[in-house]
Amino acid sequence: MPLVSAAPAGDAVTSASTGLASFETNRFYQPGLLDAPDPWLWEVVASGATRVKSFSLTGIDGTASGIAELEVFLQGGSESGQAVDHHVSVSVNGTLVGEAQFAGKKPYRMSLSLPASLLREGTNELSLTNVADTGVSSFVFLDRFMLAHPQASLLAGGRFEGTWLESGTVTVAGVGGALAVLDVTPAGASAMSSPRWLSGHEASGGALRFHAEAGHRYLAASEAALQSPRIATPEPSTLRSAGTQADYLLIAPRAFLAAAEPLLQRRADQGLTTRAASFEEIADQFGHGQPSAEAVRSFLSFAFHSWTRPSPRYVLLLGDSTYDPRNFSGTAQPSPLPALWAKTSYLWTVSDPQLAAVNGEDSLPDVAIGRLPATTLEEARMLVDKLLAWEDSGQGLSGQAALVADNPDLAGDFEADVHDIAESYLAGRNPDLLLLSELGGQTRPRILDALNSGLSFLSYVGHGGAAVWASENVWNSWDAPSLQAQSRQPLLVTMNCLNGYFVAPSFESLAESLVKAEGRGAIASFSPSGLTLDGPAHQYHRALMAELTSEKHQRLGDALLAAQKAYAQTGLMPELLSIYHLLGDPALEIR
């Protein structure tokens, strides 16, 4: 940071400084509000309801008679199509300070002025009311609020932050020792770079004096209030070495690498050059020390373009993820390996395939990528053992198949879809067709029987959610424990919505539940983390089945890459390439 002089100069500034206080809590995750700047919201206010939020202020200038500025950041949660959906009023400490009307599922910022005399030292209250007079049902979310108010220029807890409305020499009281003083004016608010260290300030007689520019934001902190940085030297790494080469790349948190050793040995025995990279090492080398999915993508891009050819073809991510890694909900499972986020037509969701789209600007994966969503070391070992046992038993994809179809409706003729697959790519196998319209309440036991009999393929086409098939709930994540040990476990393909949404923090998606079922369930799944449409999804299904049944591909990932390329050439709904995930090993031998 630059160092600039702020020695006292100019007339003394006698007006109060302005303090800025921000208040935000992450409670409700709303990925379907695509225009929201942040999917984590604080509070929901339904029609006719009032929500009260307590907040604390320190350093209020009791002598000031000025104006405070309040900004309330709202997010519409419902829309009707009419000009006004929402009417919201805001009160501070029991006094109405403003109202707003707006429409739709859009963010809305209320900028309100109020007498500074309304504010109290210590506890205050902000009340938000959904007035409910627009003629439609309204849901509004509170995201956060900010308050700029006159404050005493005084260090509190060894810290002061504020602005002044005029330039000149300012005085901050309550100083008891050495200070760090900075200009922390936000970038873009002035021509200078931010932040800047200040030199030449004077601290004596219990007061700090320095020259301040009007509108700039200043921070002063005593030595006791300064944080201590954690300093670590990155371990030696060859990840950036152009001489590195690997056909098969496994990425896992360091704690899971021991569980992956048998799988790495198996792939090496099969003739692949293997390499394991810890997530921590990737974060050091490609994330500036910060663990993130973006660091993983930067690493994969570097390996694809800069490692010795052939570049990695198969990438296995060993570790689960969640949309709540900081456990705002209080119920989140561990998130050992973060996923990359993508904005689709319908919601924010995760996209492992985008980690693998490292060549060009298109969304087509360039390497075959899959994930074993282990939350613990024990799960990592179990998933690896399940893969090895499947290959040891000589299984492939040439056995019995079952196709499950939801009731046809306006969203699609799901029965026609499975008949098409059965009569084309599975014509010689006499697949078991499980149609909800025919089986009704017997659909669940028939699915259970089909899985227990030992399948090579299981497909579902229809409506779905993260944990369920069909609105009638014919199969869900909590059915997996009722399965018997199976002689064969199938590849699961679900052409629906959200079955591959593996980032739910407190439950397993349907695809996860079957992949994680020890000795039963599915050996891998190809399922979406987002919302799909039946027409494009059926063409993707056809492209998948064409490659999976062709007997041209030795490994699952090669078949998926070919299918993804074929589907991309249709030009239909390209985002399906980003949201359909392989939960499984892309180097799994299927022939």
Image: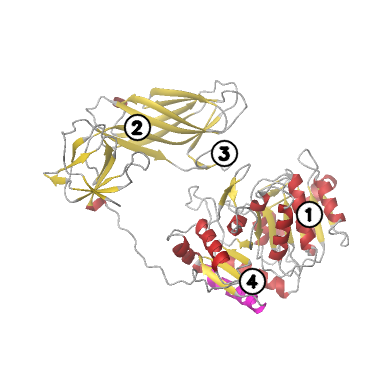
Q: Give the range drawn in magenta.
A: 256-270
Whether residue 174 sits left or right of residue 115 in the image: it is: left
Gap in Å between the C-alphas at discs 2 and 1? Answer: 61 Å
Gap in Å between the C-alphas at discs 2 and 3? Answer: 30 Å
Gap in Å between the C-alphas at discs 4 and 2? Answer: 57 Å
First reached walking from the N terminus: tag 4 or tag 2: 2
Who's the residue at 40% across and 26% down the image?
A: 91
Gap in Å between the C-alphas at discs 4 and 1? Answer: 31 Å
Residue kind at label 4, given as amino acid type: Asp
Are the residues flagged by discs 4 and 1 in contact, CB closer than 8 Å? no
Q: Could one spot residue 439 in this view of the protein? A: no
- Answer whether residue 269 is magenta in the image: yes
- State the residue position of label 1: 542
Gap in Å between the C-alphas at discs 3 and 1? Answer: 32 Å
First reached walking from the N terminus: tag 2 or tag 3: 3
First reached walking from the N terminus: tag 2 or tag 1: 2
* Other-residue count near label 2 (Cα within 10 Å), few / some / many at <14 / 14–19 / ≥20: some
Could you tell me which secondary element the residue under label 1 belongs to?
Answer: helix
Whether residue 572 sits left or right of residue 322 in the image: it is: right
| Residue 377 sits above or below residue 119 on the image | below
Who's the residue at 42% across and 23% down the image?
A: 98
Could you tell me which secondary element the residue under label 2 belongs to?
Answer: strand
| Residue 170 sits in quarter | top left
- State the residue position of label 3: 33
Could you tell me which secondary element the residue under label 3 belongs to?
Answer: loop
Residue kind at label 3, given as amino acid type: Leu
Residue kind at label 2, given as amino acid type: Asn
First reached walking from the N terminus: tag 4 or tag 1: 4
